[in-house]
Image (tube, helix red, strand yellow):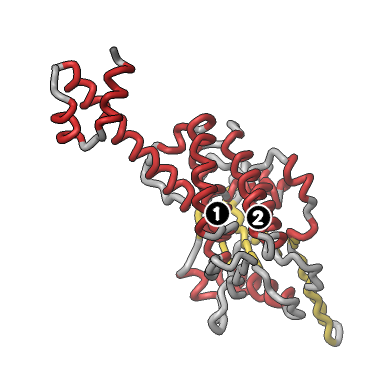
Amino acid sequence: MVGALVWEKSTDYKADVVDQDGLWKKVIGELFEDFLLFFKPDLHAQVDFTKEAEFLQQELFQKIMDKKKGRQWADQLVKVHLKDGEEKWVLVHVEVQSDNEKDFAKRMFQYFYRIYDRHDKEIVAIAVMTSPHESTFPTQFNYSYFGTELHYAYTNCKLNNYDKEELEKSDKLFSKVVLAAKYMNDTREDVDKRYAFKMKLMKKIITDNKNSRSEILAVLYFIDYLLRLPEELSKKFHETMIPIIQKEANDMVQFNGEELSPTMEAIFAHFQEEGKRKGIEQVALEMLKEGSSVEFIAKVTRLDREAIEKLRKLNG
């Protein structure tokens, strides 16, 4: 699976490769509980989330999976504990924009039996298909040869089958991740439509007070990178988002060391500059109160004379 090039009709937009694999892996890692709630609610109801999910990554996969000839998949293998104390492993496989592959179900079975054979753990397998096209991937692997038979089935979630209106109404946070993926597919040739979708989606997430700061930032990161905009529209987007953040979620601009998306970085930088400006204006105001001349204040603070005179009038 190769990250898809997203070309827009706008002539000034130089499209880059969108690392969909990395984005899916990141958002599943940061919102795994929400991921299960959306795609596998029956399992979610049985998991004890007071015990942190453990991601059994890189080294484990390197030992189990074949080399994939330069292709990458957003695979996650996660250990969870059920409420009865039982341990389960969850294999998550995200197939991004892949062509139909007749051996896909066989590949899912191979993932399963290699993990099962090596570690003897019960495994729940989930495949997420992001292609906008009607997939003909088989959803089961069957083998029959002279009386030897095998049937393997896994949970197969095709984003193409989820209704946009239902996703918009859903109160499940991961529904907005799925919606962003559908929006990306729908707006490949219409950058203005993408701008409108992105604005609507991010406003909805920011103004919804049910989710934590870290959850909101994780979804915004996914949406911001997946629904990329040309530079001019990105600037407009950032400027439009600033008052929304300030009004609805001012704590979003308090930097706590998180990895921020481009929009949040731009907004954070704006509020930093605004804070500096207010600090400088406060210094100028104190100097006015002490009787310093406008010329001297302008020299020290580098504010223009008009701004200093305005401060004088506003503060008597």
Count the labels in the image.
2
Q: Mark 1, residues whose alpha carbon is within 10 Å: few (<14), some, or many (≥20)?
A: some
Q: Residues within 10 Å of mark 2 (few under 14, many from 20)?
A: some
- Picture residue at 83% right of the left edge, 82% below the top: 144
Mark 1 — residue? 233
Type of amino acid under label 1: Leu
106 or 148, which lies in front?
106
Residue located at (75% from left, 40% from top): 169
The residue lying toward the viewer, choosing from 11 and 37, is 11
Which residue is most to the right? 147
Q: Using residue 99 as the reference point, say whether residue 314 is left or right of it.
A: left
In this view, the residue in front, 121 or 18, is: 18
Q: Quadrant of residue 102?
A: bottom right
Q: Which residue is mark 2?
A: 192
Farthest residue toward the top?
A: 316
- Mark-to-mark CA distance, 2 and 1: 8 Å
Q: Residue 24: where, in percent of width, then height? A: 58, 60
Say which quarter of the image contains residue 100.
bottom right
Relative height, residue 8 to residue 313 (above, below): below
Mark positioned earlier in the residue sequence (2 or 1): 2
Secondary structure of the residue carrying numbered label 1: helix
Locate residue 296, reporting x and y percent. 13, 30
**Measuring 58% from the left and 50% from the top, which residue is drawn there?**
32
61 is higher (above) or lower (below) than 220: below
At x 56%, y 58%, the residue is: 229
> What quarter of the picture does the N terminus occupy?
bottom right
Residue 127 makes an appearance in the image: no
Q: Quadrant of residue 91?
A: bottom right
Q: Pointer 2 and pointer 1: residues touching (CB < 8 Å)?
A: yes
Q: Position of residue 280 (x, y in %)?
A: 25, 31
Type of residue at label 2? Asp
